[in-house]
Image: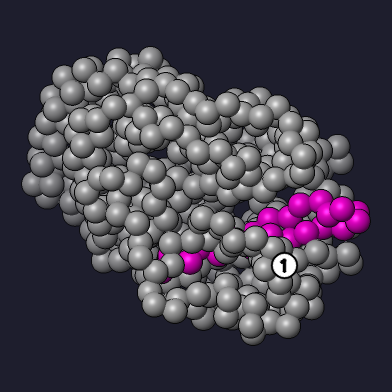
């Protein structure tokens, strides 16, 4: 799908970290993932070091139960300039650890989640907000570790600004078909002064439920973490298990995965454009885009037997083969219909005027918050795992991530349109070679535990999965991190950027995220 990134000469962030931080010790170094252990007393120094490395970013932070009854913090850094990921692992035995979000602001929501799940909190008096567990279930919800000493605070409250602004509640029950989501708009009647977002209403404890499962059993849940990214999240999880077990999927199966992933991108981007039309009151454009969306879903069913592409990914390969004849026959017509609609939209001033300068994010905000996918690309950040962290199939033409620079809804719409064309070209290339439903055998047990990381570029951006398998091949810790986990944190800032009340649905449509993806 893309040409592998060639690391710069002497670009070895991991080795420099080991040489710089006294307690840093290399645990393993494999293709795509480097693991380093760091004492918690040196964690701040290590994070300071990584935060200054060009083309690196904090991609995830999570906890796992330690062998001694403590907790092990895992900090995952994407070294985009070197084509690899670096995992810092730091055991914590006490109730506190250094405040990492003071150095890397993208860590704050994960610090709150670690507090909810493991009862650990960073040093200092920074309040821990509620991000995943609904307050009505605090007393009996299953956790990956111990409960916090005090419940997290709510992230919203009645507000008054100079006696004129008030909080207008929206949700969690919204229009038919919309996910449960609450945001409190602080407004004086038109301009949005502030916004408070709550996404925990759909929390299902899926990572807790996966503990003790075989990877095959857990895959069923992984595909349903965020149903609109079933292929991307399934691929990331399967790749994590394959790395842990040292399995290499057949080339024909990786091409099958790639075809499904690009079909998933096509229908998601079409759905996002339809939502933009609905939010701007453009009913004709909405109807035409939804016709194209329905055609894409039918194409999915014709190629893979499922409208939303469930059941394609398997551990060690692919479970369903692509019907290449159906793909070659159906793709040109449906993409041509969608292209005609987007070209008409791009000439409709009443549509473009509502998108331009709405929901603006700048590249500094996007980097600080760790945003990914079309939202980050619209600010000018060149982030795409297909280009910077390639995995098989890698025999295709070079993939240049689509970027825009204004950071508004219009830029996100333009990224959607450009990626539709890009995915179409990739699909034509992939359909020209063999693909199949084939897997390599998965061992039923193993002599020692295994650890693996997997990733895929979902329609919303980088999706990640981490697994730790015990000696029987069962999951002792699974971390599922859809792109929505990173991108919702940018929604607040986008809504505060000099927007009015009626801009909020447009901004939400342009983000095209799921609540389920973050309330997993």
The residue shown at (10%, 34%) is 340
**Secondary structure category for the residue under label 1:** strand
Above or below, 67 against 75 in this view is above
Q: Residue 6 lies in what quarter of the image?
A: bottom left
Residue at position x 75%, y 78% in the image: 23
Q: What is the x, y in percent for residue 69?
A: 91, 54
- Which is more toward the observer, 39 or 440? 440
Q: Is residue 122 depicted above or below 321 in this figure?
A: below
Query: In terms of depth relative to the viewer, which is nearer, 223 or 348?
Result: 223
Report if residue 62 lies within the magenta region: yes
Q: Is residue 445 above or below residue 161?
A: above
Dominant secondary structure of the magenta stretch? strand
Measured from the top left, where is residue 225 in percent x and y? Answer: 57, 34
| Circle 1 Cα neighbour tier, 10 Å, few/some/many (<14 / 14–19 / ≥20) | many
Q: Which residue is mark 1?
A: 37
Say how the picture is coloured: one colour
Q: Position of residue 466 (x, y in %)?
A: 62, 47
Magenta-drawn segment: 61-81
């Amino acid at each position: 799908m893309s040409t592998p990134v060639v690391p710069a000469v002497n670009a070895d962030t991991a080795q420099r970290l080991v040489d710089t931080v006294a307690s840093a010790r290399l645990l393993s170094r494999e293709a795509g993932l480097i693991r380093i252990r760091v004492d918690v007393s040196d964690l701040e120094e290590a994070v300071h070091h990584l935060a200054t490395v060009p083309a690196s970013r904090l991609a995830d932070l999570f906890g796992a139960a330690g062998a001694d009854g403590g907790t092990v913090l895992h900090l995952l850094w994407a070294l985009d300039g070197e084509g690899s990921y670096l995992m810092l692992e730091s055991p914590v035995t006490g109730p506190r650890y250094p405040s990492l979000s003071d150095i890397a602001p993208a860590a704050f929501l994960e610090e709150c989640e670690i507090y909810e799940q493991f009862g650990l909190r960073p040093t200092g008096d920074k309040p821990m907000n509620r991000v995943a567990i609904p307050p009505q279930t605090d007393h009996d919800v299953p956790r990956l570790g111990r409960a916090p000493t005090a419940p997290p605070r709510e992230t919203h409250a009645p507000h008054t600004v100079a006696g004129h602004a008030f909080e207008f509640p929206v949700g969690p029950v919204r229009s038919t078909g919309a996910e449960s989501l609450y945001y409190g708009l602080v407004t004086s009647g038109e301009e949005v002064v502030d916004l408070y977002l709550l996404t925990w209403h759909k929390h299902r404890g899926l990572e807790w439920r996966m503990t003790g499962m075989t990877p095959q059993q857990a895959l069923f849940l992984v595909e349903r973490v965020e149903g609109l990214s079933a292929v991307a999240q399934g691929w990331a999880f399967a790749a994590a298990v394959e790395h842990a077990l040292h399995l290499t999927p057949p080339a024909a199966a990786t091409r099958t995965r790639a075809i499904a992933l690009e079909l998933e991108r096509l229908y998601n981007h079409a759905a996002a454009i339809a939502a933009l039309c609905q939010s701007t009151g453009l009913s004709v454009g909405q109807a035409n885009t939804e016709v194209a969306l329905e055609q894409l879903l039918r194409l999915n069913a014709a190629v893979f037997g499922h409208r939303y592409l469930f059941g394609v990914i398997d551990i060690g390969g692919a479970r369903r083969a692509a019907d290449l004849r159906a793909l070659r026959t159906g793709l040109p017509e449906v993409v041509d219909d969608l292209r005609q609609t987007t070209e008409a939209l791009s000439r409709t001033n009443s549509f473009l005027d509502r998108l331009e300068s709405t929901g603006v994010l700048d590249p500094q905000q996007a980097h600080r918050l760790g945003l990914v996918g079309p939202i980050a690309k619209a600010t000018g950040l060149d982030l795409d795992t297909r280009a910077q962290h390639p995995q098989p199939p890698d025999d295709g033409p070079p993939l240049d991530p689509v970027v825009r620079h204004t950071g508004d809804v219009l830029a996100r719409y333009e990224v959607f349109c450009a990626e539709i064309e890009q995915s179409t070209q990739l699909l034509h290339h992939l359909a020209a070679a063999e693909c199949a439903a084939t897997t390599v055998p998965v061992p039923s047990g193993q002599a020692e535990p295994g650890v693996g990381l997997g990733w895929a570029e979902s329609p919303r951006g980088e999706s990640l999965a981490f697994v730790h398998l015990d000696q029987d091949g069962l999951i002792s810790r699974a971390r599922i991190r859809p792109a929505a986990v990173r991108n919702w944190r940018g929604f607040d800032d986008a809504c505060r950027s000099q927007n009015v009340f009626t801009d909020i649905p447009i901004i939400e449509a342009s983000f095209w995220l799921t609540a389920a993806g973050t309330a997993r």
